[in-house]
Amino acid sequence: MLCKNTSVQGCAGREEDVCYNLILILILLAWIFAGVYTLDFIEARSGENEKGRPWLNLAALFFGPAALLYFWISQQIANRSVEEVTPEQLFSARSGSKKRKKDEPPPFELLDRNSREPIVPVDTKPASVEAMTLAYGLIEDALKRGAERIMIRPDEDGEYDVYFRINSAEERTVHLGCLPGGSLVTAFKHAANLVIGERRSMQNGGFFARTEEAGVYCHVTSSRAAAGEQLMIRLGMLDHVPSLDGLGIPGTELAELRSLLAEGHGLVLLLGRPGSGRTSTLYALLLSPEMAGRRIATFENPIELKLSHAAQYEVDPYGGKTLSKLLTSAINNGADTLAIGSLSDPESAGIAIGFARSGHLVIAQIDCATPLEAFAKFEKWEITPRMFAGMPVCLLSQALARKNGGGLVAVFDLPDRRLLGSVLETQGVTVDLLRQKVAGADGSGLIEGLEQLVNEGTISREEAARVMKTITRKGE
């Protein structure tokens, strides 16, 4: 399909060349006629002999079509002598890759998740080829340096910074302008089979990086940022999950969370931006002692950690395995606990809320930084706060800040369950009412936690400001 598109683009380019040549010939023809008739006018006024002038006019008349025919024939000969260039050929030539010998180890390549074929640029434009070459180089460099994640974020001016997270500490690797950074984001979305034109909602996908030693799965998450679009690329799967006590959740909030899990019914929403550690929190909840004996079904893209006590479903919308279909199937098969890796569409949200209201337990991740933002998103999905009344609700917000001495520190906020429950029981609950009544619904708990870390000297004021900017950004 990619080659066909390229061929069409090549044909369009050749037609543009022919049209361009035609315009040049018409201009030349007009100039000749203007020159000839100017000479006619001058010589007629001066009374010179005009016997040879008609033959000159006739020659000028046929010069244009003859020149046009000559250029068309030369263009056809040139097109036949040049082979059609595909993105694969152009990328191989630009990246310096060559055909390997039989005994040589496999080269470093990025492979499509489904077909396992090498990933090539979207088209043969120089920007696309250079962006894919940079994508190859970033993944290869990150794997050699033992990075856990790659973050691509736009700043206030729309320019992009690329960060590597190595040993739980982020370091800036590359700074790119608006256009190169946007091309790099497009290259990674193309590699992960994401919809390139979709920039408002969060998307998940991935590809494989094949090295000489083994293959590494790279999970890509795209989400909207304040000045563009950001990507988080996780290199490899989770190999270690901390205990629920080891996450750093404050004692009071942790006790309330364990109480809800022990009750076995209600809704637990894990809030945070991509890269804030929500997946680790999700698995820590599923591995907690309170979950023993449950009929758990998880829904992920991809499945990052195999669980022996849960039925795990991999969401694949392009393969017909949408989240809503998988949720319905798991409920029909008798699951009493649903763990959703990413709740991002109204149909699935309606199924999850309905399941929790019927006396079961639902744990779901959602790309929102604060409870207030989460409720606003639910309202856009036509799920009003009143629908949460009558069931236990827990909204655990989290963010990650980099320590001054290296590593990351987690900041958590959990609104008081009793106060939240009393507000949701009120008739006519709105987001504005939640903002007025529920402490922490606007992110104040996270703000206080960051301020405390700054006062303790754990993180810098600049790092707190960066995390604050992420927390207060409103999602769409």
Image (tube, rainbow, N blue to C red):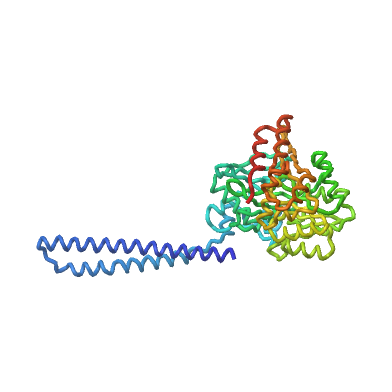
Residue 7 picture location, percent across and down: 53, 65
Q: Residue furthest right?
A: 293
On screen, residue 319 above or below 362:
below
Asked whether 439 or 297 is in front, the reply is 439
Please give the name of the residue rendered at 16% of the width and 68% of the height, measured from the top-left corner.
Answer: 52
Q: Is residue 413 visible?
A: yes
How many numbered marks, from 0 up? 0
Residue 150 picture location, percent across and down: 67, 46
Q: Is residue 167 visible?
A: no
Q: Residue furthest front?
A: 427
Please give the name of the residue rendered at 73% of the width and 64% of the height, measured from the top-left corner.
Answer: 321
Please give the name of the residue rendered at 53% of the width and 56% of the height, measured from the top-left corner.
Answer: 125
From the viewer's perspective, tell me whether residue 116 is left or right of residue 123.
Answer: right
From the viewer's perspective, tell me whether residue 56 is left or right of residue 143.
Answer: left
Residue 149 picture location, percent across and down: 70, 46
On screen, residue 475 above or below 402:
below
Asked whether 63 or 235 is in front, the reply is 235
Asked whether 446 or 24 is in front, the reply is 446
From the viewer's perspective, tell me whether residue 295 is left or right of residue 443.
Answer: right
Quarter holding the N terminus is bottom right
Residue 279 picture location, percent across and down: 76, 49
Asked whether 278 or 146 is in front, the reply is 278
